[in-house]
Image (cartoon, rainbow, N blue to C red):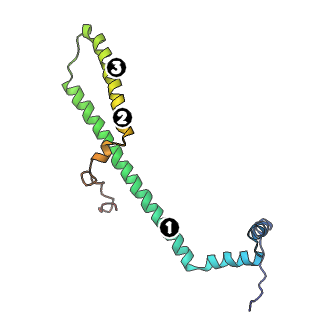
Amino acid sequence: MRDRMNVYFPPAMLKEIADLADRKGLSRSAIVEAAVASFLSPDGTDRREAAFTRRLDRLTRQVQRLERNVGISTETLALFVRFWLTITPPLPNDAQAAAQIKGRERYEGFIEALGRRLQKGQSLIQEIPEDVIRYPKQEDGNEPD
């Protein structure tokens, strides 16, 4: 047995309910009943919250990996530049033209080697084990998950 209840909806919402009922081949009462049941269901809220929590956890791990990878890239570049500046003596003026030509050749070789490496799916980041670089501690002193 069903009890009757009179409710009032804004005209725009009534139109949406009627359109959905037509598309689904259901009555307007069935659409409203399903919406109210979903709203009142504690499981629905728990499922949505669990889904949001899983998504946020996944996003957090992705951001942590990005942070780690950017940190490794930055430190790698900084170390290379510091090393290069330390060991490379200045060139005399008459040798600079030849050095620039040689530098362009070496750069092109570097780009080709990098392209080959990336095509194979190889990456410096993949060569560094996860446990070598630890994520920074959170404000509460715990390491992130």
Left-right relation of 40 to 58:
right
Left-right relation of 17 to 50:
right
Q: In the current view of this chain or complex, which residue is farthest to the top? A: 94
Q: Which is more toward the observer, 132 or 4?
A: 132
Three-letter amino acid code at the position of disc 2:
Arg
| Callout 1 crowding tier (Cα within 10 Å): few <14, some 14–19, many ≥20 | few
Which residue is under mark 2?
Answer: 116
- The x and y percentages for residue 68 are 33, 49
State yes or no: discs 3 and 1 in contact (Cβ < 8 Å): no
What's the residue at 70%, 79% (across, down)? 33
Q: Can you tell which mark lies on residue 104?
A: 3
Which residue is under mark 1?
Answer: 51
For marks 3 and 2, the one nearer the N-term is 3
State yes or no: discs 2 and 1 in contact (Cβ < 8 Å): no
Q: Which is more toward the observer, 31 or 127?
A: 127
Give the secondary structure at mark 1.
helix
Q: Quadrant of residue 77?
A: top left
For marks 3 and 1, the one nearer the N-term is 1
Q: Which label lies toward us, 3 or 2?
A: 2
In the rendered image of this protein, does residue 115 appear above or below residue 44? above
Q: In the current view of this chain or complex, which residue is farthest to the bottom? A: 1
Q: Which label lies toward us, 2 or 1?
A: 2
Three-letter amino acid code at the position of disc 1:
Ala
| Callout 2 crowding tier (Cα within 10 Å): few <14, some 14–19, many ≥20 | few
> In 3D space, how far apart are the residues under numbered discs 2 and 1 (Cα atoms)?
40 Å
Give the secondary structure at mark 3.
helix
What's the residue at 59%, 79% (across, down)? 41
Three-letter amino acid code at the position of disc 3:
Arg
For marks 2 and 1, the one nearer the N-term is 1
- The x and y percentages for residue 107 are 33, 24
